[in-house]
Amino acid sequence: MIHSTPETAVERDLRRLRTLYRALGDETRLRVIGLLAEIGPMPVNELSKRVALSQPLISWHLRILRLAGLVETERHGRTTICRLRTAAFEELHDAEARLIAGTAGVAGRADAPGSVPDVS
């Protein structure tokens, strides 16, 4: 039987930041987020047209954004509507604020002194 230690708040914050930064680290995905922020929810085929990508490629980008919790999708018959999840940006801001304020607890990790947590 494998025993794993529960994830700490620090580890959760670092993992969440890494996931969000990776999802936001692509210009196409940033464009999608910008469109959803400016225009509001829209069908995948409309997003595909606006960013000039094929439907399979825009779906791939949307999957990454959805897994990161940045967008939500909802099926309406044969149409999938995408919507920005603004709460994810509040979560990102809160985790960043703890990190840069020095209150995240990174220094208290059980890693070797002076080591930097692996975020690759």
Image (cartoon, rainbow, N blue to C red):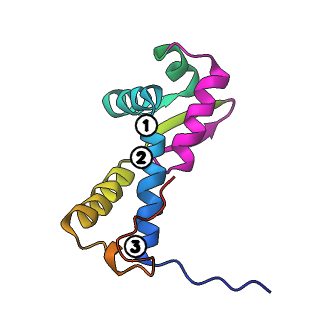
Q: What's the residue at 65%, 82% (across, down)?
A: 4
Which amino acid, mark 3?
Val
State the mark number for residue 21.
2
Between residue 49 and residue 27, name the one nearer to us: 27
Residue 29 image offset from top left, x and y in percent: 46, 31
Horizontally, residue 120 falls left or right of residue 2, namely: left
User: How many discs appear?
Assistant: 3
Q: Amino acid at mark 2?
A: Tyr
Q: Residues within 10 Å of mark 3 (few under 14, many from 20)?
A: some
Residue located beneath label 3 in the image: 10
Between the C-alphas of marks 1 and 2, the distance is: 6 Å
Q: Residues within 10 Å of mark 1 (few under 14, many from 20)?
A: few
Q: For this rendering, which residue is in front, 93 or 37?
A: 93
Question: Looking at the image, which is closer to me, 54 or 112?
Answer: 112
C-alpha span from label 2 to label 3: 16 Å
Circles 1 and 3: CB atoms closer than 8 Å: no
Residue 56 lies within the magenta run: yes
Q: Residue 77, how many percent across, how many down?
A: 68, 33
What segment carries the magenta color?
Answer: 52-78
In the image, is residue 87 part of the stretch drawn in magenta? no
Q: Amino acid at mark 1?
A: Gly
Q: Residue at x 22, y 70 (%)?
A: 102
